[in-house]
Amino acid sequence: MSAILRLDMTSRTHSLSESANAEMAGRWLTSSLVAAEVPPLAHPLGPGNKVVFAPGIVTGTRAPSSARVSVGGKSPLTGGIKESNAGSSWAADLASMRIKAIVVEGQPATHSVWWGAHITWDSSQAKPAVHFFDATEYANKDLYEVFPRIYERFGDKASVAACGLAGERGLANSGIAFNDLGKRPSRYAGRGGLGAAMGSRGLKFIVVDATGAPGVAVSNSSLFDGGRQKMFEALRSHAITKPQGALNTYGTAVLLNILNEAGGLPTRNFTAGRFEGAGKIAGEAIFEGNKQRVGRDVYNHACSPGCVIQCSNTWHKPNGKEHVSCLEYESAWSLGANCGIDNLDDIAELVRLCNAYGVDTIEMGTTLGVAMTAGVLSFGDGKRAIQLMHELEVGTPLGRVLGSGTDTAARVFGVSHVPTVKGQSMPAYEPRAVKGMGATYATSTMGADHTAGYTVAPEILSSGGKVDPLSPEGKAALSRAFQATTAFVDSTGHCLFIAFPILDIPSGYQGMLEECNGVLGTNWTADDVLRIGGDILKTERAFNIKAGIGAAQDRVPEFMKNEPLPPHNHVFDIPDEALDSVYAGL
Amino acid sequence: MCLTSRTKPLTPSTPDFSKADRGTELPVPRRPVLSSMHVKVKLFASLAAMVPGSTPGTPVDVELPPESDVRDLVSRLNLPEDALRVIFVNGRAEGMERVLRETDEVGLFPPIGGG
C-alpha cells in the first residue's frame, strides 16, 4: 500500500486512496499533486489551494539523514508553486504508516474554530486512522507554550506539524513548524508562506503517532542495505559531515566567515558584501560563546531521527540556560549581517520569536532590512527589532506589514532597493559576488531560493569542484545542473547536506541510487537523477507560467545590475539570454 | 628611539658623483631591499586551534621573506597543507602558488559547508 491521505477541511472527513505513481515521493510528489490539483489562478488563501505533505523515497528507512518532509502548495508569498522542506521525526513517522502524502484541501465555512488532525495507526484495520480535534484553545499563542500542551495531550510518541499565529492570520511570511528531537517547535518548512496556506484550510495541527505502524516497504533489502552503508560511510568520512567535522562543531553558521571573506555576505539590506561584525555572530563565535556560558565544548545535535551529520546548534544565555535552538547560517545572517546586528543574544531572541510566531527567519530578516532602509528602525538596532516582532504578535497594522514579507514591506515603505525574485527574498549569498547564486535566485521556480541550486559549493567552498564566483561564465549551466540534481535529492527525503559528500565521494552518490532502487525496485542511474529532476522542474515551471509567472520574472532586481557591490565592486552581469537558457536547456 | 637627541639628520649614503672619473662608468646606486614583508592571516573554524595563540577570524601578523607564496606561509604556520580547503587573498580564492605582497590579507579555511 502506498496511500494518499486526503483531509477534507470543508466536511472534516478523510479518505485514503492508492497513489497513482508509487515511485513519486517528496518534492516530486508534492509538485506533481499541486500541479494536477490546484488551479494555477486559485487564490492561495481561498478554497482552491491545497497543502501537500510528502516524506521522501527513503524517509522512514534506515537510510542516514533521511527524515525530511516536503510541503507543497500554491505559495501565498510568490503566487507560484512552492516546495518547502523540513527535517523532523514527523516525516519518518508518516512514512512508516505507508502514507505517501497528506493532501489538505477545502476549507471550513467559518473560521471560528481551529482544527487539528490526529493520525494514528489502526492495527485492526491495517491502515491509518484520523480524528479531527478542536484546537481553538491553542490558537493565537506562542508555539513554545503550545507544543508541550500538545505532547501532554497526545503523548510522548507524537510528532507535531503546526502553523503558528502568523499562519492563522494569513500572513504571507508564515511557515509550518515541525518538532525537533527535543520536542521544540523549531524545524521549519519556512519559505513561501505555507503556514498561511495551512491556516486558511482551518487546520492548525497535524499530530502523528506511528505506534504499531508497519514501516516503509523495501523492495530489495540487500540492495538497499548496501546503498545505505555506502551513504553512511560517505557521510561519516567527509570532512564537512563527519563527527566533530565542520557541521557537527560549528553548524551551518560556520559559513558566515567564509562568505564575509569572499565579499559575498549581503550586509545592511544588500548594500555591501562584507559585515564588520561577521566574526561576532559566526559559528566559531557561537561555539566559543557556548563554551564560556556552559563551561564546556558544546557539539551539535540531530534535528531528526537517523541523522549522522548532527548540525543543529543551541545558543545559550549568559546563565548557561538554553536560549534557542538552532541558530542557522541563514538566520544569523538575515537577522544579523543583513540588519547590521552583531549581537548574538539579540539574534537568538529574534530567531526564537520567529519560531514562536511561525514565520520564516530568512524572510523576516530581509523584511526588517527593508524596514531599516526605510528608516522604520535603525540598522543594528536589535532591541527595536525585537519590539517590532512583538507588534507582529499583537497584530498592529505595522506588525501585519512586517509579517507579510519583504516585497510588501518595501511597497508600503516606498523602498526600491528590494532583494527579491518572484516575491520571495534572497538568502545569504550576494548575487554580485556569487554569480551562480544569482542565476539560481533568478530562475528557480521557487523564487529566490538558495537550496534550490546551491552553486555556493563550487563557487565558494571548493566542494564538488571549483569555479570563480565573480565570473559570469558558465553559471547558467552550473545552476541548471544543481537545480535538477537538487530536485531529485529533495525527492529522496535526504537532507540536502548529503550533497557535500556525494559530490566528492562517488560511492556515496552510488549509495543514494542503491537506496532508492532498493526501496522502489527501480534501476535508476545518474541519468535518471537528471531526468527526474528535470521533469520536476518542468512541472513546476508549467504551473508557474499558468499562474502568470514567466521568463520575464527570471531576473535579479534592477539595482543589482546597476550598483557595484563593495568590496569587489561587481554588478550582476550574467546576460538575460544566459538566464533564459537555464530552462531552455532542460 | 628619540629623534630629538640627534644632532645630524640621518641621510642614506649616496655616491659622490662629483668625484666620478669621466670616461668610467658611473656607480650604480643600490636600491634598498626589504629583508622581510608582513601579511595578515586569519584562520577560521578548526584551523585556528592548530596555530597556538590564534582565535578564529582575528588577524595574525606574519613576517615572511619577500616573494614568499601561500605555501611558504602555510609552512611558516606549521599547518599541514591538506588541512586547508579554501585560501583567500584579499577576498579572491587563490592557490598555494600565489605570491604574496606586503599588506596582503589572507583567509584560510578547512573544508566547511552549510546552507
Image: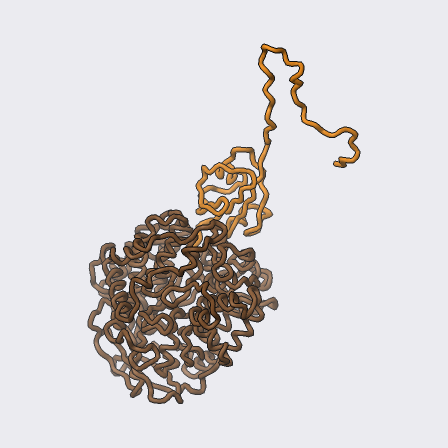
Chain colours: A brown, B orange
Give how far across and how far down residue A200 sits, in percent.
Answer: 36, 81
Q: Quadrant of the N terminus of chain A?
A: bottom left
Q: Is residue A187 left or right of residue B55?
A: left
In the picture shown, does residue B31 fall above or below A199? above
Identify the residue shown where x is 47% and y is 53%: A565
Q: Is residue A297 left or right of residue A560?
A: right
Q: Nearer the viewer, residue A561 or A333?
A: A561
Q: Quadrant of the C terminus of chain A?
A: bottom left
Identify the residue shown where x is 49% and y is 80%: A395
Q: Nearer the viewer, residue A397 or A106?
A: A397
Q: Quadrant of residue A13?
A: bottom left
Q: Is residue A196 left or right of residue A367?
A: left
In the picture shown, does residue B61 fall above or below A152? above
Q: Nearer the viewer, residue A245 or A399?
A: A399
Give how far across and how far down residue A244 sits, in percent.
Answer: 47, 56
Residue A556 visible (yes or no): yes
Q: Is residue B86 left or right of residue A551?
A: right
Residue A258 visible (yes or no): no
Q: Nearer the viewer, residue A429 or A16?
A: A429
Q: Quadrant of residue A21?
A: bottom left
Identify the residue shown where x is 54% and y is 62%: A340
Question: How many numbered marks does the figure carry?
Answer: 0
Give how far across and how far down residue B59 sits, in percent.
Answer: 57, 47
Give how far across and how far down residue A396 sits, in percent.
Answer: 50, 80
